Amino acid sequence: MRTPDISIAPEDPRQADVRQLIDLSDAHMQALYPPDSNHLVPVETLADADTVFLVARRDGEVLGSIAFRLIAPGHAEMKRMFVRADARGHGLGRRLLGVLEDAARSREITRISLETGIRQPEAVGLYRAAGYRECPPFADYAPDPLSLFMTKRL
């Protein structure tokens, strides 16, 4: 039996099924980090014109998401990278990251930065494997012992 293909495309984060995924992501992050170390962007911000929100679906079912928001000319911040637990381990995170970078390049973004937590070794490993390197805090972030800041030139 053939597994249905996974599509990754821009979508509105305010859709009910996408909000459920974002709620799962929030719960996951809240279990790992105290409130002061959680930098979760609200759904309304993810729907702004300066943000691209991508959703991975298989046969219509939401599996994961990733977004970027413009923070300066040519510089975007990655937000909301999340893959449902039952969809992990098959390279979907890597695919989401690749589609995000392609979307950024098409909008003349030359650098993507991100903040992630030190209690997410799989995410940190994915970002390092994709060429992201540690950097100082950027934009409005302050140093946080539970945060890791990374950036990549596209």
Image (cartoon, helix red, strand yellow):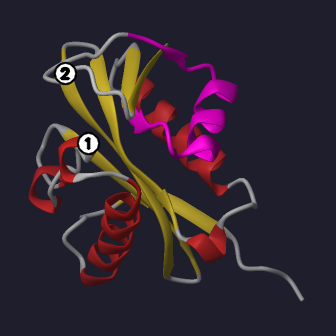
Q: Considering the numbered disc 2 on the image, is that residue within a helix, a strand or a loop?
A: loop
In the rendered structure, which segment of residues is drawn in magenta?
115-135
In this figure, which residue is indicated by the disc labeled 2?
142
> Residue 2 colored magenta?
no
Front-lying residue, 110 or 148: 148
In the image, farthest residue toward the right = 1
> Residue 126 colored magenta?
yes
Q: Which mark is residue 12?
A: none
Front-lying residue, 80 or 115: 115
The amino acid pointed to by label 2 is: Ala
Q: Give the Cα distance between marks 2 and 1.
A: 10 Å
Residue 23 vs residue 81: left or right? left
Residue 29 vs residue 34: left or right? right
The amino acid pointed to by label 1 is: Ser
Residue 79 to residue 64: above or below: above
In this figure, which residue is indicated by the disc labeled 1?
37
Residue 106 to residue 1: above or below: above
Q: Which residue is rendered at x = 25% and y = 47% of the image?
A: 38
Residue 7 point in image, percent of width and height: 57, 64
Q: Which residue is rendered at x = 38% and y = 35% of the image?
A: 146
Q: Quadrant of residue 1?
A: bottom right
Q: Which residue is rendered at x = 41% and y = 56% of the image?
A: 32
